[in-house]
């Protein structure tokens, strides 16, 4: 009997949600995603000390002030890990723009261009990189500019239908709706501790987005993210992409139950919502009508920004050490 992981791979592109090279190699995903939290978790491992030290030396050569060096080392570190990951996966790696730029169109575009420039200097084509941006209105506008330049974007921290609609209209390459964090909010708010794969609010959110995109011909890839259990993953079998942590990948590998395809382009034609169009004021109103999405987007930006600052503090100590 094929494992759940192998069954899933037959219908969905599996992406590894980690910065650990060994874990990525073990599960043979198509793509990999990183973020400041994941890089922070692996940057202190001794097996990556050579990469970190090379990035520190790079930063010292780029600028004279310590603070400018910290920025250059951090950017180089994200790219260095991404470059190594691309030696393992056949597809693409996602690299995140500083969450503190979530409301800064020009700043986000400049940072994305810098990251792509570092990748290209390392011999990596921009076609193998997805730039991750927070799904704020400003992040979506930045993505629209970048996509026109051939820089492909992965819109992260996506919780509301409004965010998904705006991303589809902007023609972004990929969106990452956060299944687990939606689930967390409802568990905390409603007090319900147990959900099935067919009534989990995070799963239902991604199904709604997937069906809407397929019904109306949007080319944007839907990649479910931030899973808390394998039920949430099996409930999205057939979704374009799913990015999954090593822990849950292992559980899927060990499970041999028969999985049912939950999402298809054909079924979406009869399930998707009617098409809508959102300008800025409509987007802000519809998004802000969703209390969960407003709270989780703000929280997500704060958490990624905090981990970015922790990572920078580690780098600062290395530069001054």
Image: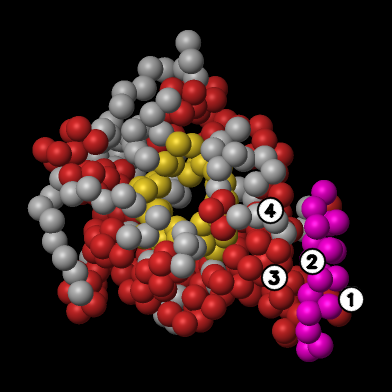
Q: Count neighbours of disc 3 (C-alpha within 10 A) and say few if under 14, some if 14 to 19, many if 20 or more.
A: many
Residue 321: give its label: 1
Q: Earlier in the sequence, mark 1 or mark 4?
A: 4
**Residue interval drawn in magenta:** 47-66
Q: Residue at x 35, y 32 (%)?
A: 237
Q: Position of residue 185 (x, y in %)?
A: 34, 57
Disc 3 secondary structure class:
helix
Disc 4 secondary structure class:
helix
Q: Are marks 1 and 2 in contact (CB under 8 Å)?
A: no
Q: Position of residue 66 (x, y in %)?
A: 78, 85
Q: Are marks 2 and 3 in contact (CB under 8 Å)?
A: no
The quadrant in which residue 58 appears is bottom right
Give the distance between the C-alpha atoms of the residues marked 2 and 3, in whole angstroms: 8 Å
Q: Residue at x 55, y 64 (%)?
A: 96
Is the residue 120 above or below the residue 213 in the image?
A: below
| Residue topped by disc 2 | 55
| Residue topped by disc 3 | 74
Q: Main secondary structure of the magenta part?
A: helix
| Residue topped by disc 4 | 83
Q: Count neighbours of disc 2 (C-alpha within 10 A) and say few if under 14, some if 14 to 19, many if 20 or more.
A: many
Give the distance between the C-alpha atoms of the residues marked 1 and 3, in whole angstroms: 16 Å
Give the distance between the C-alpha atoms of the residues marked 3 and 4, in whole angstroms: 14 Å
């Amino acid at each position: 009997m094929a494992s759940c992981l192998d069954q899933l791979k037959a219908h969905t592109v599996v992406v590894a949600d980690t910065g650990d090279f060994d874990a990525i190699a073990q599960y043979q995903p198509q793509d990999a995603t990183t973020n400041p939290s994941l890089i922070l978790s692996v940057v202190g491992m001794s097996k990556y000390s050579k990469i970190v030290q090379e990035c520190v030396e790079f930063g010292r050569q780029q600028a004279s002030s310590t603070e400018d060096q910290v920025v250059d080392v951090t950017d180089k570190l994200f790219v260095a890990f991404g470059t190594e990951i691309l030696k393992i996966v056949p597809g693409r790696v996602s690299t995140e723009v500083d969450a503190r730029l979530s409301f800064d169109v020009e700043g986000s575009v400049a940072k994305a261009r810098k990251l792509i420039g570092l990748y290209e200097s390392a011999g990596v084509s921009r076609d193998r990189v997805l730039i991750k941006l927070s799904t704020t209105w400003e992040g979506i506008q930045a993505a629209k500019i970048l996509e026109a330049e051939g820089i492909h974007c992965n819109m992260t921290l996506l919780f509301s239908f409004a965010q998904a609609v705006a991303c589809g209209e902007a023609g972004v390459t990929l969106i990452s709706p956060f299944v687990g964090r939606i689930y967390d909010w409802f568990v905390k708010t409603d007090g319900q501790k147990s959900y099935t794969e067919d009534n989990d609010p995070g799963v239902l959110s991604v199904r709604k987005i997937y069906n809407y995109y397929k019904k109306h011909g949007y080319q944007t890839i839907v990649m479910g993210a931030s899973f808390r259990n394998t039920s949430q993953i099996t409930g999205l079998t057939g979704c374009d992409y799913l990015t999954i942590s090593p822990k849950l990948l292992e559980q899927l590998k060990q499970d041999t139950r028969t999985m049912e395809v939950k999402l298809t382009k054909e079924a979406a034609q009869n399930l998707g919502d009617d098409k809508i169009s959102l300008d800025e004021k409509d987007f802000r109103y519809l998004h802000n009508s969703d209390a969960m999405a407003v709270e989780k987007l703000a929280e997500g930006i704060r958490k990624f920004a905090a981990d970015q600052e922790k990572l920078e503090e580690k780098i600062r100590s290395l530069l001054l050490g």
